[in-house]
Structures are given as C-alpha cells and as structure tokens.
Image (cartoon, rainbow, N blue to C red):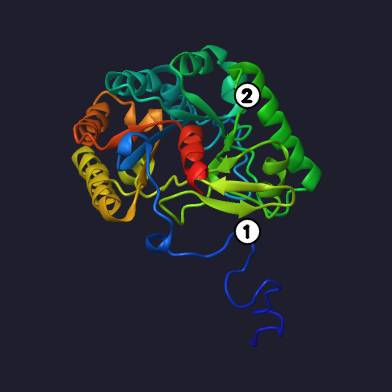
Amino acid sequence: MSLPPDYLAYAKRRYGMDHDRYAWSMLPRRKTVRWPGGKLVALLVVPALEWFPLDMKAKPFKPPGALVTAYPDLRHYTLRDYGNRVGIFRVMTALDRFGIRASAAVNAAVAARYPSLVKACVDRGWEVIAHGLDMDHLHVEGLPLAEERRLVEETLAILRRVGGQRIRGWLSPARSESFATLDLVAAAGIDYVCDWVNDDMPYAMQTASRVLHAMPLPNDIEDYTILIQNRHSEDEFTQQVCDQFDLLCREAASQGGRILALALHPWVIGQPYRIGALERALDHIMESGEVWAATAAEILDAFTAQE
C-alpha cells in the first residue's frame, strides 16, 4: 500500500532548527563564565518530590516512575511515597553534611498534602522549583490552552502559598512540554526551565512575553536513569557521577565555568543501601575544592550577570 502524499509533510520543516526559541551555538565558542570565588564547577542538586496518583491515567504516555500494575497498584504507589516519607530525609542529611543547599522540584500536590515537607526544604535554605501539579498532569501538545494555563497557575499558586517563595524555576512532569508551555510559564513569572537537556550551561530562550533561560539538568546522569532504567549498580552510579564531574572540571579549567546538575529521586537514591552511593560521589566532588554549591536561581543570577 502506498503512503498518502502528505505522510511526510511537516509544517515546521525549514533550514536550521524546527523552532525559533533560541539561537544555536557551540559551547566551547561562547563567552567564558566565572563562578563566585573562582570555582570551576557550580553544583546544582535537584531532588524531586513527586506524587503519582493511585488512579493515574498516564495519558498520553506514562511518565518515568509511573505506576505499573492494575489498579490499585499499592506496591508501586507506596514505593514512590517512600521517597517523601523516608528517602528525602536521608538525602537532606547527606547534603547537610557538605553544606549543600538543593533546589527541590516539587509537585504542587505534594505541597498541598505535605506542607511540612516543603517547610523542611525551605528551612534549610533550599529553593523550590515548580514541578507541575502532579505526575499525572502532563504538559503536552493537544492539551487545550486554557487548561494548560490553569495547570501552570494552580501549580504556582499552591507552591508560592505553601513555600513562601517567589518560585522562579519550572520542571515539567516527565519534562514534557507543549508548544505553549514556555510562553505560559514565562507569563506567570518563571525565569528558567529545566526541561531541555541539550547543554551543560544556561542559555536564553525566547517566549511571547520575555526571555527566560534553559537550566541544564541532564536526565542520563540522574539516579532513576542509571539505577532503574539502565539497571547499573550503586558503585557504577557513584563512578558515573564522579566521571561527569571530573570531565567538567577539566573543561572548566580552560574553557570557563561549568555546571554539574544532579537530578535525584528520593524513592530511588534514598534507600538505605543506595544513599551511600550519593555520599561517596559528594565526597569526591566536594574534596576537590573547585565547587560552588548553589541553588538554580543563584546559578542563573551569576550567569546572567556575566551574559
């Protein structure tokens, strides 16, 4: 059977990229960035505090960590909830040991259900990043514009009320976006997004109302990808994080500052037999003396001051 004439038609096909959100550039050719104190690498740690509804629809796709078996999937639901009840406090202890303030990506549903957990983050000087309403409300093309705007506004209203912060960052559930997401979050006061994984440094993005920035948060070095999806060992997780840091450090010595961004899921890395893997990686990173540990907003401000 032959294909219809419009099968390969794509309205956005043109020379260059298929969008005009940002200018394409090669990292080694950009202006050199210097971090405070002359440090080579800015360390950004982003623990995710997520809520997976027991009756989640997982449409139009299952987000990473979605429930698995038929309703009610209590086994996987409670494992995810373990991260918010137990695992996150092990992550906090590990970061406290090194004086690292994280930027927690928080579902608004978590803030509404467990405000004391958000308070524990804020009391440590952590930043709160908006992580959508919950893990079953994805931002995807085809979602009515008014509905997506409602999701953004409701998410930010809850997080700003519970956390008492302005909320400058956005990480979509499953990093999913529609073509309107950037315009909506920028109009709502967001300064940076963590959904795009095509760089090791921030870069400016155009929206309908103003410029915001993409903040690097690679998913291939996060705990879920390495330990759950790739099924690597805890020792391999430690080694990969250390290798990531070592190379960024070498690049920064000749090309200017770099960012080591670590996305963590407390229900994964917060297990008793896994938390040591994170602690060993942090030992290696912090003993170098070349690290500025900061929140995402602080890193963005230091970057834009030189931009």
**Dot 2 corresponds to which residue?**
159
Q: Residue at x 43, y 56 (%)?
A: 31
Q: Residue at x 59, y 18 (%)?
A: 163
Q: Is residue 303 left or right of residue 183?
A: left
Q: Is residue 136 left or right of residue 39?
A: right
Dots 1 and 2: beta carbons under 8 Å?
no
Q: Nearer the viewer, mark 1 or mark 2?
A: 1
Q: Is residue 127 left or right of residue 34?
A: right
Q: Where, by quadrant of the figure, is residue 55 drawn?
A: top right
Residue 41 vs residue 152, the one in the foreground: 41
Q: Residue at x 45, y 37 (%)?
A: 299
Residue 1 position, x and y percent, is: 64, 86
Instruction: Check disc 2 and give the amino acid type.
Output: Leu
The outermost residue toward the right is 146
Instruction: Check disc 1 and give the amino acid type.
Output: Arg
- Residue 91 visible? The answer is yes
Eyeballing the image, is 197 above or below 132?
A: below
- Disc 1 is placed on an element classified as loop
**Dot 1 corresponds to which residue?**
21
